[in-house]
Amino acid sequence: MVDEEELNYLTYLKVPQLLGMQQLRSEPPHPEELHFIIVHQALELWFKLLLHDLERIIAALDADDWAGTLVLLRRVNDVMETGLDQMRSLHDMPPWSLQQFRSYLGTASGLQSVQFRELELLSGLRDPAHLKALAAFSGGRLQPDLEARLAQRSLAEAHAAAAARLGIGIGSGVAGRSWADFYADPGLDAFFYVVCESLVDYDERWIRWRTEHVTLVERTLGAKVRGTAGTAIGYLERTVRYRYFPHLWELRNELSVRGGGELVDGRS
């Protein structure tokens, strides 16, 4: 334990230890490997903050604290943007450079990021096929940390419960409002409307994140090559369809129909 009198910028942030954690494995050391390591280590730090703040957002939603929810959601969305920018910086790495040190990565893959999977589960992803795939990645059953997140109250569940308390959503009762009705006229619940749209912003950043990941793999490895963990790009492409708040996307169809639009399946 560092004495308080000795505490300074370097010791408080453990900068020497932090800067000593980038261990290049390529021989001779490839100049692009440092960039590759730092981006992924930085992302893991951001994931840790996102998990911390999502738990706080869930608590704020359960307390009907819309102001507190919005403040934290703004930061979460900003952090997601920061992560996207960091990942895009890997586009500047020549694809042949990656191939020159890729063999030194062993089976290391972004698919093995436990925190990323925790974020999915804590946000509300409960798709059975996805859970089955996660279990398959770890030998047939979910890792303990993921099992714990699966048992935890999710952001999507907290949002649905908050909406139900306001009489919004399917099954909210005779006096309740559909999501489309609520969006058409939030009334006194305008702050909750802003919360909903901020959650759509969060969902949108995940869509962009997944799309960006697919693009990055195509750009650095190619669309037909298996990843270091043995998976094909098709797995990543399938994840782009996931939504944490599908009802907040679906209601837009009904609003469009109310405004005179026509759905592609011919319904009006």
Image (cartoon, rainbow, N blue to C red):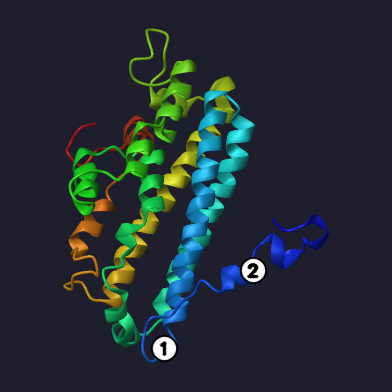
Depth check: give the residue in front, 152 or 139. Answer: 139
- The answer to whether residue 99 is left or right of residue 10 is left
Q: Is residue 164 above or below residue 34?
A: above
Q: Quadrant of the C terminus?
A: top left
Depth check: give the residue in front, 218 or 166. Answer: 218
Q: Identify the residue at image location x=32%, y=38%.
A: 147
Which residue is farthest bottom?
28
Which residue is farthest right?
5
- The answer to whether residue 254 is left or right of residue 222 is right
Q: Identify the residue at image location x=64%, y=64%.
A: 14
Depth check: give the residue in front, 81 or 186. Answer: 81
Cα–Cα gap, marks 1 and 2: 23 Å
Task: Please name the residue that numbered disc 2 is placed on.
Answer: 15
Q: Is residue 123 above or below residue 268?
A: below
Q: Identify the residue at image location x=77%, y=60%.
A: 7
Q: Is residue 252 visible?
A: no
- Element type where label 1 sits in the image: loop
- Quadrant for residue 262, please give it: top left
- Quadrant for residue 29, please give it: bottom left
Give percent across and percent down for residue 99: 28, 84
Give percent across and percent down for residue 17: 59, 69
Q: Identify the residue at image location x=45%, y=29%.
A: 159
Q: Is residue 242 visible?
A: yes
Give percent across and percent down for residue 90: 42, 75
Q: Quadrant of the N terminus?
A: bottom right
Task: Give the amino acid type for the residue marked by disc 1 in the picture.
Answer: Pro
Give percent across and percent down for residue 151: 35, 31
Task: Give the amino acid type for the residue marked by disc 2 in the picture.
Answer: Val
Task: Please name the residue that numbered disc 1 is placed on.
Answer: 29
